[in-house]
Image (cartoon, rainbow, N blue to C red):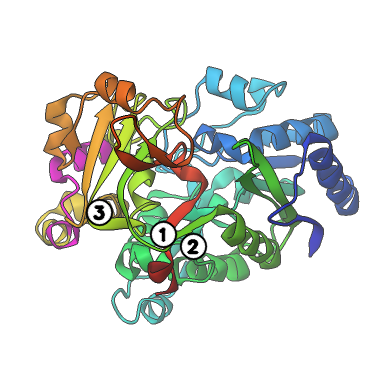
C-alpha cells in the first residue's frame, strides 16, 4: 500500500514539504506504541534520512523505542557522527548492528531458485538474515528509511536491501554480493529488476510479510545551482513504493554521454569516505562512462583504510583489486576468500579490469599501500592544488593549461554512463 507519493524530475521537496508528506503518511498508518526506525548510517548522509529520523522522533516521542542504523559491514557510528546526522535525537535510542553476532535467519531461499536467477552459475541456498531486534523486538511498527539511487551490488539501492543487507548477517551479505558479481556489474547498475533484488523480494514475500514494515524512500538530485535537493518522497509497505522511487531515480540520478570520458576526477568527502570499500564508488559509478585507456583520478582526503571491517581490510590488502580472472583464481585456491564472498565480489567490482587506470590520492594511506592493491598513487596535496574541488563544477572543466576533464563531487549520488553501454 502507498501511504504517500510525491515527486518528479523537476520537483523540489523542501523541509516543510518533507514534514507534511511524512506526517500525512503516519496519520494514515495510525498510532503505535513501540516503534523501531532503521535509517542508513553516515555513509548515506545526503539521503536526508537523518532529518527524516529526527521528524519521526518528534512525531512518536516516547513510542519510538529503538533506532538501528543499517551498518551492513561498516564500522559503528561515532557519537559525533550521530550528533551530526540525527540532530536532536537522544543517543540512548541508538543500537549497533553486529553483522556477525546479532542476526537470526528468518528463512532460506532454495538453491534451485538461486540457480534459476543466475542461469546456473550458482546453486547455493541463500539465508535471509536480519538483526534479531527487527525480528524479535516486538515492535508494532518498523520504519525503514533511505535513498533510492543507482547501486553497484543491487542495481538500485534501498527498499528491502536496507534490512537484509544493511541489517543482515555475514553469510547473507556475502552470498548476495557474490550473486551480483557473477551476474556482472554492468548488467546490474541502474536496474531495479535483477537477480539480487529478486533474491531479497523472495525473502520479503516468504519470510517477513508478517512484520509491520513501512518504507520511507527519498530520491535526491541537484538544482540549477548544484545544491542537493529532494526530488521525490515515497512512503509505503510493499514493492510498489520502491518501483516508483526507482523510476524517478533513473530520470534524476543518471548522466548519459554520447562519447566515453577520457579523464575523470572524483572527490570523496572525508566525512563520508574513509575506505576504498566505500570510496570505490568512484570506480563503480563511472566505469560505464570511462573510455578504454582512460584515466580516473580519485581525490580521497579521508582515506585511511581499505575495508570498513578489519577482516575485509586484511583480505583486500592480501589480494588487491586485480580483476575478475585473478580474483576467481584466488577464490579457488584460498579458503579465507571463499569464506568471505562479499570481499571477493568487492575485489571484482573495484577493478577496472585493466580497461582504464585508477589513481588514488589518499589522505592517510601510503604510496606503498595504494600500489600494493594495484592502484596508482599520487600525492593528495599536489593534486588538490591542480584539481581544487572548491573551484571545480560538477561536469566538464578546463584548466588554464588547456587540460579537459569531467569532475564529480560525490559519486554516491548518481551513475555516469555512455548511452550505448546503458542500453546493453
Numbered disc 2: secondary structure: loop
Q: Which region shows up in magenta?
A: 312-327
Comes first in the chain, label 3 or label 2: 2
Residue 251: give x, y in percent of width and height: 60, 60
Could you tell me which residue is drawn at 14 percent across and 63 percent down? 325
Determine whether 87 is above or below 228 in the image.
above
Residue in the foreground of this view, choosing between 26 and 268: 268
Q: Which mark is residue 190?
A: 2
Graded by Cα atoms within 10 Å as few (under 14), some (14 to 19) or many (20 or more), the crowding at tag 3 reads many
Q: Is residue 317 magenta?
A: yes
Comes first in the chain, label 1 or label 2: 2
Determine whether 362 is above or below 351 in the image.
above
Per the image, the residue denoted by label 3 is 344
Pointers 3 and 2 in contact (CB under 8 A)? no
Residue 318: give x, y in percent of width and height: 14, 41
Residue in the foreground of this view, choosing between 215 and 93: 215
Q: Which mark is residue 417?
A: 1
- Asked if one can make out residue 143 in the rendered structure from this viewpoint, the answer is no
Numbered disc 1: secondary structure: strand
Q: CA distance from mark 3 to mark 2?
A: 22 Å
Amino acid at each position: 500500500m502507498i501511504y504517500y507519493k510525491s515527486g518528479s524530475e523537476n520537483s523540489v521537496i523542501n523541509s516543510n514539504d518533507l514534514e507534511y508528506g511524512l506526517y500525512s503518511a503516519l496519520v494514515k498508518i495510525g498510532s503505535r506504541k513501540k516503534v523501531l526506525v532503521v535509517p542508513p548510517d553516515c555513509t548515506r548522509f545526503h539521503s536526508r534520512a537523518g532529518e527524516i529520523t529526527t521528524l519521526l522522533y518528534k512525531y512518536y516521542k516516547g513510542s519510538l523505542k529503538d533506532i538501528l542504523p543499517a551498518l551492513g559491514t561498516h564500522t559503528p557510528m561515532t557519537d559525533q557522527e550521530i550528533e551530526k546526522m540525527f540532530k536532536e535525537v537522544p543517543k540512548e535510542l541508538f543500537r549497533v548492528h553486529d553483522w556477525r553476532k546479532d542476526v537470526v535467519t528468518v528463512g532460506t531461499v532454495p538453491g534451485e531458485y538461486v540457480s534459476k536467477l543466475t542461469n546456473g552459475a550458482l546453486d547455493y541456498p541463500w539465508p535471509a538474515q536480519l538483526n534479531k531486534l527487527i525480528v524479535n523486538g516486538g515492535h508494532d511498527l518498523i520504519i525503514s528509511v533511505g535513498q533510492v539511487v543507482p547501486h553497484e551490488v543491487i542495481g538500485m539501492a534501498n527498499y528491502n536491501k536496507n534490512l537484509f543487507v544493511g541489517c543482515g548477517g555475514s553469510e547473507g551479505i556475502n552470498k548476495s554480493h557474490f550473486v551480483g558479481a557473477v551476474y556482472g556489474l554492468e548488467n546490474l547498475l541502474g536496474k531495479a529488476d535483477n537477480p539480487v533484488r529478486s533474491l531479497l523480494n523472495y525473502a520479503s514475500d516468504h519470510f517477513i510479510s508478517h512484520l509491520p514494515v513501512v518504507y520511507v524512500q527519498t530520491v535526491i538530485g541537484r538544482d540549477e545551482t548544484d545544491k542537493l535537493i529532494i526530488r521525490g518522497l515515497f512512503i509505503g509497505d510493499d514493492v510498489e513504493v520502491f518501483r516508483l522511487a526507482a523510476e524517478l531515480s533513473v530520470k534524476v540520478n543518471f548522466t548519459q554521454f554520447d562519447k566515453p570520458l577520457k579523464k575523470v576526477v572524483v572527490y570523496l568527502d572525508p566525512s563520508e569516505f574513509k575506505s576504498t570499500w566505500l570510496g570505490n564508488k568512484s570506480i563503480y559509478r563511472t566505469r560505464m562512462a570511462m573510455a578504454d585507456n582512460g584515466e580516473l583520478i580519485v581525490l580521497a582526503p579521508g582515506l585511511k583504510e581499505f575495508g570498513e571491517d578489519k577482516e575485509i581490510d586484511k583480505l583486500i590488502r592480501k589480494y588487491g583489486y586485480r580483476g575478475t580472472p585473478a580474483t576467481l583464481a584466488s577464490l579457488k585456491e584460498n579458503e579465507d576468500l571463499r569464506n568471505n564472498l562479499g570481499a571477493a565480489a568487492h575485489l571484482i567490482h573495484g577493478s577496472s579490469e585493466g580497461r582504464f587506470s585508477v589513481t588514488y590520492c589518499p589522505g592517510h594511506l601510503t604510496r606503498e599501500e595504494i600500489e600494493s592493491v594495484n592502484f596508482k598513487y599520487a600525492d593528495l596535496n599536489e593534486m588538490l592544488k591542480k584539481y581544487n574541488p572548491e573551484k571545480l563544477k560538477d561536469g566538464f572543466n578546463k584548466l588554464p593549461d588547456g587540460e579537459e576533464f569531467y569532475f564529480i563531487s560525490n559519486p554516491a549520488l548518481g551513475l555516469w554512463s555512455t548511452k550505448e553501454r546503458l542500453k546493453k
